[in-house]
Every structure is written in C-alpha cells, then in structure tokens.
Image (tube, helix red, strand yellow):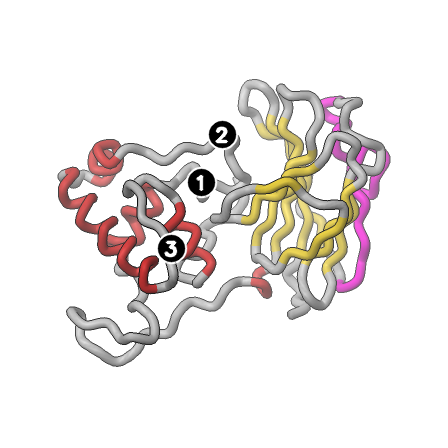
Amino acid sequence: MLGMTAAIQVLCRDRDGVLHSGPPHPVTPGEAVLVGREGDLALGVEPADPKVSRRAVEVTRTGSGWRVDVTNRNGVVVHPWGQPPGLAPASSVHVWPRVALRVAGRPELQHWVLLTDDALRVPRPVPVPGTSLTETADQPRPLTWPQEQAVRELFAELLAWPPLVPATPLQLKQVGTRLGLKTETVQRRLEEVRKKAVALGLSRTGSLTDPEYLYVLVRAGYLEPAGDAR
C-alpha cells in the first residue's frame, strides 16, 4: 500500500477563519516527520501559539498506513475525511486517503496537519449486472449523480477539506434551494441514498440529516474525496 503520492501539509485557521498554510511536503516510505514549534514542519509558529508543544506529533507513512505518535501536551483530535472525529491515542495507524490531525493549542486557533495519499483510497464499488429497479443481494449499486449531488450538498461542511469545526448538515429546504429542486425531490433522493447505506450495514436510521449513513457510504467507497485542499 506504499505509494508515491503521500504528503503532509500544515496549516492554521485563525479566529477570522483565514487559513495560513505551508506547501505540501512529500513523504517517502518510512520517513518520520516531526511536527511542532521545533519540528521538521513548523506548527504553532505563525500565528504563534505557545500551547502547541515543541514536538507535537510525529507522522510516518508505513507499509500499512499513516502512523501517528502524539506528544502534544494538549492532545490531538483525528478527523478522517468523511468520518466522525475522535481523540487520538498516544500511537495509532490510519489507513485512509485523507486524515487531518487537529493539534490542540489556543482555543481561538485551529492547527491542522493534513495527511494525504491516494494509494489509501477505498475502492469504488464495481457496478454489477442487473436492472435499474433491482439491486443484487451482494451490494447496492453505486450512487447516481443526482443522489451523490444531494448527499454532498447536504453534508458539505462534514466533507470539507481541510475540515470545518464545527460542521453542521444543511436543512433539506436549503439543499433544495441550492440545487434548484423541490424539498420533496431532495428527500426522495436522500431516502434512496440511505437505503443503500442500510444494505451496507447501517444499524440505525435517524433523520435524513443524521450523518451516520454518510459515514457508512464513505467507508464502503461510495463517496470519495473531491477537489484539493483549500
């Protein structure tokens, strides 16, 4: 699973939402990159943030994924693209195409370490024979473009890269306005999307704005990252 596309990028989002970013740093297999105020890649320097540790996190692209070793005294939160965030343990490995590490410092600043590697993408499902009305028992058919458009618009903030914190789904009416559709049309499309997630193992169904079915679809390769870091 080692590829030549692995890169690390550090950035900071200030209190006004402005991003201060450095260029992507290509990473070779086995290379350990230290990030922090005195790291190989500087974080917490511009803007200055003494609450970021000098040696905040070390990242290595291993044969199995991204190994993350945390030493930041205020902790690190892991944001896998299209998945719920969680507090990072002292050491962990992440097999995911885009992983963002939010290094905790001053509350008005968001420090990010972005890990990207296309070699770790989840394969998209291969279309299987059948009709447009009948799905096989093995797996649901891929999302249609109208279905994908609706789910990406609804959960745009949750799919943003770099991540947005906080991130909130839109209302169905807002999605309809943005896409030029009736709310009922948006609802039907999203209901079909959620049915696919149920077939993939979604264990509970809440409202259509509940992102649990989004997470299932992303894990199964039905939605991929789109575009570059902004």
Local secondary structure at mark 1: loop
Residue linked to disc 1: 158
| Image quarter of the N terminus | bottom right
- Depth order, front residue of 49/75: 75
Instruction: Residue under label 2, please give it.
Output: 166
Please, what is the three-letter code of the amino acid marked with disc 3?
Ser
Q: Which residue is mark 3?
A: 203
Across and down, in percent, residue 226 comes to: 44, 51
- For image coordinates 51% across by 42% down, the residue present is 161
Q: Amino acid at mark 1?
A: Leu
Question: On screen, 30 above or below 108?
Answer: below
Crowd around label 2: few <14 · some 14–19 · many ≥20 (10 Å): few
Q: Which residue occupies the foreground of this view, 148 or 220? A: 220
Q: Is residue 100 above or below residue 65?
A: above
Q: Is residue 169 magenta?
A: no
Foreground pick, 71 / 117: 71
Q: Residue at x 71, y 26 (%)?
A: 105
